[in-house]
Amino acid sequence: MSWRRTVEAKFRFDPTKGVDPRDIAALDREITDMKQKLEHSISNGPQTLTQIRDHILSQRTVLKPLVDEAGKALARASANLKAAN
């Protein structure tokens, strides 16, 4: 961090020199890449959400009988406990 502060303290922008076109081109490429990734994520959003929903629904179907059976077992255990006391 101290090296960074030293470099920042020495930096002086010279408007007569301008900004290196290679730096601008690199920044433009970086922004374009980010934009494309975001657009891809947004355009795939509905499909991704549909897949997530379908997965949840299938898991719900698979797990519901197990949860129901666990609930029945709990009810039986509770009844047995009350009967034993």
Image: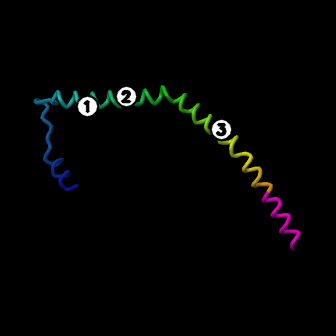
Point out the frontmost of discs 1 and 3: 3
Instruction: Say if the magenta span includes residue 60.
Output: no
Where residue 60 appears, as percent x and y from the top left, is: 68, 42
Amino acid type, mark 1: Leu
Marks 3 and 2, how far apart at CA: 34 Å
In the shown orientation, is residue 84 left or right of residue 9?
A: right
In the rendered image, which residue does mark 3 sit on? 58
Q: Which residues are magenta?
A: 73-85
Q: Are marks 3 and 2 in contact (CB under 8 Å)?
A: no
Amino acid type, mark 2: Lys
Instruction: Say if the magenta span includes residue 84.
Output: yes
Looking at the rendered structure, which numbered label has been put on residue 35?
2
What secondary structure is the magenta-colored segment mainly?
helix
- Point out the tag, 3 or 2, that comes first from the N-terminus: 2
Picture layout, residue 2 above or below residue 45: below
The quadrant the C terminus occupies is bottom right
Q: Secondary structure at mark 2?
A: helix
Name the foreground residue: 42 vs 4.
42
- Point out the tag, 1 or 2, that comes first from the N-terminus: 1
Name the foreground residue: 64 vs 26.
64
In the rendered image, which residue does mark 1 sit on? 27
The part of the image, by quadrant, that contains residue 11 is: top left
